[in-house]
Amino acid sequence: MYLSRFLSIHALWVTVSSVMQPYPLVWGHYDLCKTQIYTEEGKVWDYMACQPESTDMTKYLKVKLDPPDITCGDPPETFCAMGNPYMCNNECDASTPELAHPPELMFDFEGRHPSTFWQSATWKEYPKPLQVNITLSWSKTIELTDNIVITFESGRPDQMILEKSLDYGRTWQPYQYYATDCLDAFHMDPKSVKDLSQHTVLEIICTEEYSTGYTTNSKIIHFEIKDRFAFFAGPRLRNMASLYGQLDTTKKLRDFFTVTDLRIRLLRPAVGEIFVDELHLARYFYAISDIKVRGRCKCNLHATVCVYDNSKLTCECEHNTTGPDCGKCKKNYQGRPWSPGSYLPIPKGTANTCIPSISSIGNPSKFNRIWPNISSLEVSNPKQANVCDNELLHCQNGGTCHNNVRCLCPAAYTGILCEKLRCEEAGSCGSDSGQGAPPHGSPALLLLTTLLGIASPLVF
Ligand SMILES: [Ca+2]
């Protein structure tokens, strides 16, 4: 039996590899949701886990400032140069484009000199705190794939909190605290991401690494996504398979990198000295020239395309799923509970397609009545063993699992797991196919009785 199973897999593999387009040679692209493969049994669809490419997410966000009138220049005001309280002839004027510093200048193309930046009003009302919330909203769940990088044009703030929301801004959780003195500002011991480990990777830390005031040349603040990935994928992220394996099995880890909104809470501007110089309050303000956020739409591994239409991001769902995140099964495809795709097994993952509901099959007279028709077996994913399992009933609609490597489908069905109506693939189901009567009896029962040679009153 084992030999014949090996030969059968081998024969299929030779057929597949000689005709079909090759699979990606490396793991982890997940850039195809399905592909047509040729087997000894003919052309079949092979489904796999898929996700959109990682991209610059700042093109798709809405930015909101709180207080809303905190941007400088209305009315026009002068401010002092960084680090030099006696050079106070710089001007911010919202009504003059060359002198205005609106929020969109945090997201424009950078790389020119001088850089363009958003700037707040100065700390005129000291000692009342100068605090600004900058909220970035996508109205869509996204998965972060690279460090968040904030570049300050002025000194980096003395105190700041980066926060995230997973529910479109209804609730917020801290992502990271930043301060020149963590103990003083937030009653937290200072830590660096490098102090964390696989076991403490979700810990929220306060770091003093990025808050050295405006006496240093560095103007950048990071939220270190890649260092956190590296706890699983190793240095230079060479072993992404290990990371994907962890993301697959640990929802908390997956959620950690998932957001709908980010909020930068600027709590105290760079002062650079122990005391605030009350005679030169025009020295103190916030200015940000660039914010980088890279990520991808969260589509639950059911889409490679995420479209931006009417200022809204939406996954173009495959695998019979629907919803902005492909988070549920399409109507008439609720034959089993919805499930996200899985990164495993590497390299193609598992699609976990939604399959037709029994009630959506329609009038069985439209279909071939011979159940099962062994000559029209569907061959499931020939590359992997264990694609189905009789105990777990992975084959659907009466299909049976053959040697754990393929589903034998009733004539009316097709697909790796017999999840699709054959007429649907051919486009010949007819108008009532979605709403008709269920078939005569359970397909599984029909198949079983036929296989056992038992005459069943339910068989036509
Ligand atoms: Ca800019």
Image (tube, grey):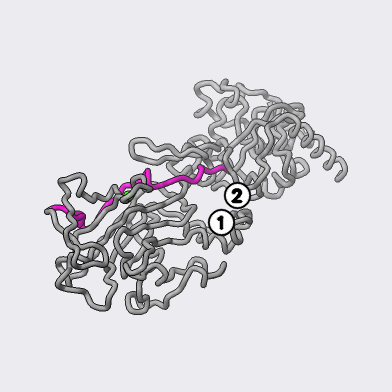
Residue for point 32% across, 51% down? 115
Q: Residue 199 placed where, x, y %?
A: 56, 69
Q: Residue 428 placed where, x, y %?
A: 57, 20
Q: Is residue 53 visible?
A: yes
Residue range corresponding to the magenta coloring: 50-74
Q: Locate residue 208 relative to residue 249 in the image: left or right.
A: left
Q: Amino acid at mark 2?
A: Tyr
Q: Amino acid at mark 1?
A: Leu
Q: Residue 74 placed where, x, y %?
A: 14, 52
Regarding mark 2 in the picture, which secondary structure is present there? loop
Task: Identify residue for label 2.
Answer: 343
Q: Residue 228 placed where, x, y %?
A: 52, 62
Sequence-wise, which precedes: disc 1 or disc 2?
A: 1
Query: Answer yes or no: do the residues labelled 1 and 2 have beta carbons within 8 Å?
Result: yes
Above or below for 371 versus 217: above
Residue for point 61% across, 36% down? 419
How packed mark 2 is, by other alpha carbons closer than 10 Å (few <14, some 14-19, many 20 or more), is: many
Q: Is residue 458 visible?
A: no
The circle drawn on residue 257 is none
Q: Locate residue 116 relative to residue 146 in the image: left or right.
A: left
Above or below for 81 versus 307: below
Quarter of the figure that contains the N terminus = top right
Foreground residue among 343 and 234: 234
Q: CA distance from mark 1 to mark 2?
A: 8 Å
Judged from this view, the residue extending furthest toward the left is: 75
How packed mark 1 is, by other alpha carbons closer than 10 Å (few <14, some 14-19, many 20 or more), is: many
Dividing the picture into quadrants, the one containing residue 126 is: bottom left
Task: Identify residue for label 1.
Answer: 247
Q: State yes or no: residue 63 in magenta.
A: yes
Q: Total marks drawn? A: 2
